[in-house]
């Protein structure tokens, strides 16, 4: 199954997508993690991306697309994957749809992890990642509102979107995700 996860910073996407990937035995793909790895490795793409990440801005589409599509083409992704953190803009969603359509491997479901704004701020204040300073967090939340929220309409219009209540214990949230996935019949290839 190919699953996309959408949700604001602090919603718990990272944790839940790793758990779901394990449960479904498919690889978890996080563009945030890939970009942080690329930065740590000192690659050109990583160094360029870090300039944007440090400021809480989105990395330009062509850089993120390059890193994601390269990974998506690996053999272990052929049967499915969980994509966390991509797409984040409508052009990215279009690029992903096109990439998948060319390989006859459509997305089955898009999960939106929903957490109210006040709770996000509370969670992010206690996390302590390099790009979690108050100012940068604010910018990331704003980028989500401005650029990523329109994606919800995009996927809603394609009947792919399922909203998951992200409040409660991690186990409760996970059970809600499984229920949403069960409600979707995997498409025949
Ligand atoms: P969060 O969802 O908490 O912001 P991520 O690890 O998903 O954390 O992303 C961290 C940063 O990586 C983002 O603020 C952004 O700069 C960059 N990034 C990750 N994915 C994308 C993407 N699809 N498009 C643009 N930038 C991205």
Image: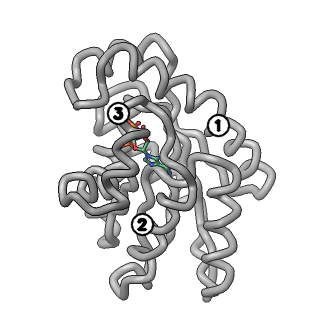
Q: Secondary structure at mark 1?
A: helix
Query: Alpha-carbon neighbours of circle 2 within 10 Å: few (<14), some, or many (≥20)?
Result: some
Q: Earlier in the sequence, mark 2 or mark 3?
A: 3
Q: Is disc 3 surrounded by few (<14), some (14 to 19) or many (20+) residues within 10 Å?
A: some
* Mark 2 → mark 3, Cα distance in angstroms: 18 Å
Residue annotated with mark 2:
67
Q: Nearer the viewer, mark 1 or mark 3?
A: 3
Location of the C terminus (image quadrant): bottom right
What is the spatial separation of the Cα atoms under label 1 and label 2, in whole angstroms?
Answer: 20 Å
Q: Which residue is mark 1?
A: 147
Picture coordinates of residue 173 (x, y %)? 39, 38
Q: Image quadrant of residue 188?
A: bottom right
- Tell me the number on the disc at residue 48: none
The residue indicated by pointer 3 is 54
Q: Is mark 2 within 8 Å of ligand 1?
A: no
- In terms of secondary structure, where does tag 2 sit? helix
Q: Secondary structure at mark 3?
A: helix
- Image location (x, y in percent) of residue 166: 44, 31
> Residue 149 versus residue 166: which sits nearer the camera?
149
Left/right placement of residue 106 relative to residue 44 reads right
Q: Measuring 56% from the left and 32% from the top, which residue is drawn there? A: 144
Residue found 67% across the figure and 69% down from its top = 97
Give the x, y percent position of residue 154.
75, 50
């Amino acid at each position: 199954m190919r699953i996309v996860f959408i949700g604001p910073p602090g919603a718990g996407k990272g944790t839940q997508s790793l758990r779901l990937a394990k449960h479904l035995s498919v690889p978890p793909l996080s563009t945030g993690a890939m970009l942080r790895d690329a930065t740590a490795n000192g690659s050109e793409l990583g160094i360029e991306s870090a300039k944007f990440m440090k400021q809480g801005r989105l990395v330009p589409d062509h850089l993120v697309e390059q890193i994601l599509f390269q990974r998506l083409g690996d053999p272990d992704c052929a049967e499915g994957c969980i994509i966390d953190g991509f797409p984040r803009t409508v052009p990215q969603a279009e690029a992903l749809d096109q990439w998948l359509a060319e390989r006859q491997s459509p997305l089955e479901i898009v999960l939106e992890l929903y957490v109210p704004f006040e709770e996000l701020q509370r969670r992010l204040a206690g996390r302590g990642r390099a790009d979690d300073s108050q100012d940068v967090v604010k910018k990331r939340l704003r980028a989500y509102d401005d650029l990523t929220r329109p994606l919800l309409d995009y996927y809603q219009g394609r009947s792919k979107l399922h909203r998951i209540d992200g409040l409660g214990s991690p186990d409760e949230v996970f059970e809600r995700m499984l229920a949403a996935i069960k409600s979707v019949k995997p498409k025949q290839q």
